[in-house]
Amino acid sequence: MAVTTASRLWRDTLLTAVVPLIWGSTYLVTTQWLPPGLPFSAGVLRVLPAGLLLLLWTRHLPQRQEWPRLLLLSLLNIGAFQALLFMAAYRLPGGIAAVLGAIQPLLMMSLLWQTPRPLVLLAACTGLAGMAVLLNAGNAQWDTLGVLAAAGGAIVMALGMYLARRWGSSLPLLALTGWQLTLGGLMLLPAALWLDPPMPALSAANVAGYAYLSLVGALLAYGLWFRGLRLLPPVAVSALGLLSPVAAVILGWVALGQSLHGWTLAGMVTVLASVLCVQLASSRRPARA
């Protein structure tokens, strides 16, 4: 039984780890395939179609008393996060935007008001150090608004994860995902209409980029993410987010020919080691229901 439980735990961890790897590609797709200067429109086109598809598939309505919490979760996990994510993606290069998400594990520990195991705390701080190495490697370019947006995205995502875990929901997983994507997309729509310039004529690459972000980056990724949040310790889930900048850096090297310096490789190895340590330490203590 113990072996079966451990195997299930690592299977769930690996499935959840797919999500930050997908999200790490957002920065490459945004800069290479999407029309420039449309951060809010990109957020709407990413989440709203995926949410509507899930609602048509699941056909579940929230209970009346769940609506206030559902609206707040949709704002944090989808609306605000997507707006900040694409602002950072448009204004910062490659993995720099994703790097600032390294503060998520420490934020989760603070929100949970828990005293983490020494190994978890050490691993989280080591991951932060690895992110700092990545941030300063390869002549990173800074943009103040982009950095603030990336840091803000990490904060709202950590808060949304904490509240989603604390509150729970009577909705099935896919229905909950669909409602959050739909409501979050509707919250972004006014900003897209009022703040973004008019949408230009879309090329085949633009359509492919939006389709990838919606079907893979939202529908598949958020379904797996919320599933992992239900099954795994929240600090372990947030630590997996450190894989996002690693994926962004590797994709920049493979697809754009960006160089990988020795310090960049050292930072990546440090991050991967910290993620593994958090998962090992978290797996030794059963997650609370």
Image: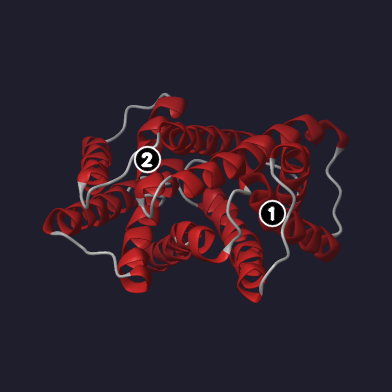
In the foreground, 109 or 158: 158
Please tell me which residue is depicted at 16% across the width and 59% down the height of the picture.
Answer: 261
Could you say which disc has been placed on residue 189 in the image? none
In the foreground, 139 or 277: 139
Q: Do callouts 1 and 2 mark residues in contact (Cβ within 8 Å)?
A: no
In the rendered image, residue 25, in percent from the top left (x then y), is placed at 46, 62
> In the shown orientation, is residue 76 left or right of residue 14?
right
Please tell me which residue is depicted at 78% across the width and 38% down the height of the picture.
Answer: 190
Q: Quadrant of residue 142?
A: top left
In the foreground, 165 or 245: 245
Amino acid type at image mark 2: Leu
Few, some or many C-alpha atoms within 10 Å of disc 1 (few <14, some 14-19, many ≥20)?
Answer: many
Is there any visible trace of residue 1 in the rendered image?
no
Sequence-first tag of 1 and 2:
1
Please tell me which residue is depicted at 27% across the width and 44% down the height of the picture.
Answer: 135
Few, some or many C-alpha atoms within 10 Å of disc 2 (few <14, some 14-19, many ≥20)?
Answer: many
> In the shown orientation, is residue 121 left or right of residue 190?
left
Please tell me which residue is depicted at 86% across the width and 59% down the height of the picture.
Answer: 59
| Residue that extends furthest to the left in the rendered view of this protein | 262
Q: Quadrant of the N terminus?
A: bottom left
- Report helix, strand or loop for mark 2: helix
In the rendered image, residue 232, in percent from the top left (x then y), is placed at 47, 50
Is there any visible trace of residue 35 in the rendered image?
yes
In the rendered image, residue 288, in percent from the top left (x then y), is placed at 49, 40
The total of numbered circles placed on residues is: 2
Q: In the image, is residue 165 above or below residue 228?
A: above
| Residue that extends furthest to the bottom in the rendered view of this protein | 204
Q: In the image, is residue 284 above or below residue 147?
A: below
> In the shown orientation, is residue 123 left or right of residue 252?
left
Amino acid type at image mark 1: Val
Could you say which disc has been placed on residue 47 in the image? 1
Circle 2 residue? 100
